[in-house]
Image: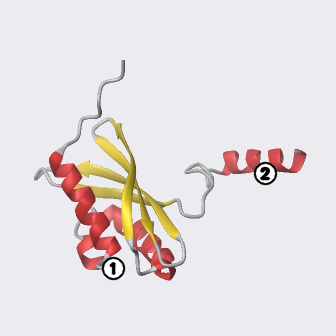
Amino acid sequence: MQSPAVRIPELEAAIDAHARAVCGGDQAAAERLLQARGLEGHRAAWAAAAANHPFQGFEVLARARIGSQYIVKVRWHGASDDVLWQNRWTQVADARWLIAEVEDLTIKRTPWADIPALREAARARDRNG
């Protein structure tokens, strides 16, 4: 029997605050929940998502614990299309939860689509039917 997922209230609050900031178009508030190393990916994802503003809402699709970090997938429902990001959350020294990395999965078939060896294998499979 699988045990129920354990939720960390502080992490859930941070996930919700970030998702609401993105939903509301408040980039500054969203970026306050990022580590410096995550800013570049976040800004690229933000720019790509701009065509889908305004967002009508969001949903957290998945959470996965990997060691002391959590991978969280969030989908925002946009005016013309949905946006899907995978965020890697980590707890920092002062106990806050911050995003260490953002990956925009909106146009990827899988999160592994940009790994060269896997991408080439998929292309070869597609060519060979």
The image shows residue 107, relative to residue 52, as above or below, that is: above
Q: Give the camera-side residue of 6 and 56.
A: 56
Task: Identify residue for label 2.
Answer: 123
Q: Quadrant of the N terminus?
A: top left
Give residue 63's position: percent from left, percent from top: 36, 44
What residue is at 63 percent from the left and 52 percent from the top? Answer: 113
Q: Secondary structure at mark 1?
A: loop
Q: Is residue 10 left or right of residue 103?
A: left
What residue is at 35 percent from the left and 68 percent from the top? Answer: 39
Task: Identify residue for label 1.
Answer: 25
Q: Quadrant of the C terminus?
A: top right
Q: Foreground mark, 2 or 1?
A: 1
Q: How is the image coloured?
A: secondary structure
Give residue 21's position: percent from left, percent from top: 28, 72
Crowding at dot 2, Cα within 10 Å, few <14 / some 14-19 / many 20+, comes out as few
Give residue 6's position: percent from left, percent from top: 24, 35
The answer to whether residue 126 shows anywhere in this view is: yes
